[in-house]
Image: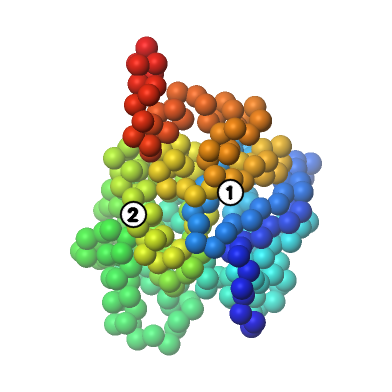
Amino acid sequence: MAKDTTENAIEVRGLANRFGSQTVHEGLDLDVRRGEILGVVGGSGSGKSVLMRSIIGLLRPAAGSIRVLGVDALSGRAADRGHVERSTGVLFQDGALFSSLTVGENVQVPLKEHHPELPESWRYELALLKVKLAGLPADAIDKLPSQLSGGMRKRAALARALALDPPLLFLDEPTAGLDPIGAAAFDRLLATLQEALGLTVFLITHDLDTLYAICDRVAVLADRKVVVNAPLAEVERFDHPWVQEYFHGPRARAARRAATGDAGDTATEAG
């Protein structure tokens, strides 16, 4: 396989997704640059998770092209499919951990699938490394998901997503259901991992604090496509009703202040 030297980790062109008479995406284009954290936002029903599932191969789009790390993700070739699977880690919104498996066994699932030749002791040690990397204590490896708090389950799912050392990480609402302190801690962990491992991160979120704290760019889904994909300062100025309402309400102003340390609107917010 030829070495990929393109700037973009993901390139989506002309994507269409339809479910019966419902059209979710039509003519959607998106670039995700290597080494960035891209926040993906949009109103309910805008198809954020559908877009993610199309990119990682869980959903076949009605039309369009998708390239992931230089590979045609829709080619149908086993070699291309395997390359995408090995190069991507996914954290679904609910964590999607196997309830009957321990944390360590959950983390070992992708290792067993893609590296069956590894001795069991090696897989355990690799799983332990990922558990620690995700910010969990070592003894969490032998616990069931039901024995963990919500925040710890998110980290366990992150450890599994990191199992194969993927350069590309997909996260669907990773801070949903977490309290503000837990959500902020997860954001810091993700930013640290991204910088240390050079990850490219596709991050679906509705959390404004996350967008302002760690995202390099933000892609907004509306009108069945990506209407803007740019740094936050540019997104805030984009002339679209949903964008203006979302990024200029009280919560957005509070998130912006928290990220910049600006107390300028404090009196207004308190009023």
Query: In the picture provided, is 159 more to the left or to the right than 85?
Result: left
Q: Which of 73/157 is in front?
A: 73
> Residue 155's spot in the image, x, y percent?
34, 56
Query: In the picture provided, is 140 more to the left or to the right than 267?
Result: left
Give the residue type that dot 1 points to: Ser
Q: Is residue 231 visible?
A: yes
Give the mark toward the camera: 2 or 1.
2
> Residue 130's spot in the image, x, y percent?
33, 68
Image point 41% across, 38% down: which residue?
209
- Cβ atoms under marks 2 and 1 closer than 8 Å: no
Dot 1, how many residues are within 10 Å of its Cα: few (below 14), some (14-19), or many (20+)? some
> Residue 54's spot in the image, x, y percent?
65, 57
Q: Is residue 44 visible?
A: no
The quarter in which the C terminus is drawn is top left
Dot 2, how many residues are within 10 Å of its Cα: few (below 14), some (14-19), or many (20+)? some
| First reached walking from the N terminus: tag 2 or tag 1 | 1
The quarter in which the N terminus is drawn is bottom right
Numbered circle sitting on residue 49: 1
Residue indicated by mark 2: 189
Placement of 6 over or under 120, stated as above or below: above
- Label 2: state its secondary structure: helix
Give the residue type that dot 2 points to: Leu
Image point 59% across, 57% down: which residue?
32
Query: In the picture provided, is 139 more to the left or to the right than 104?
Result: left
Placement of 53 over or under 78, stated as above or below: above
Residue furthest to the top: 271
> Residue 104's spot in the image, x, y percent?
32, 68
Image point 40% across, 43% down: which residue?
213
The picture quadrant where one finds residue 134 is bottom left
The picture quadrant where one finds residue 255 is top left
> What is the spatial separation of the Cα atoms under label 2 and label 1, in whole angstroms?
23 Å
Image point 54% across, 63% down: which residue?
34
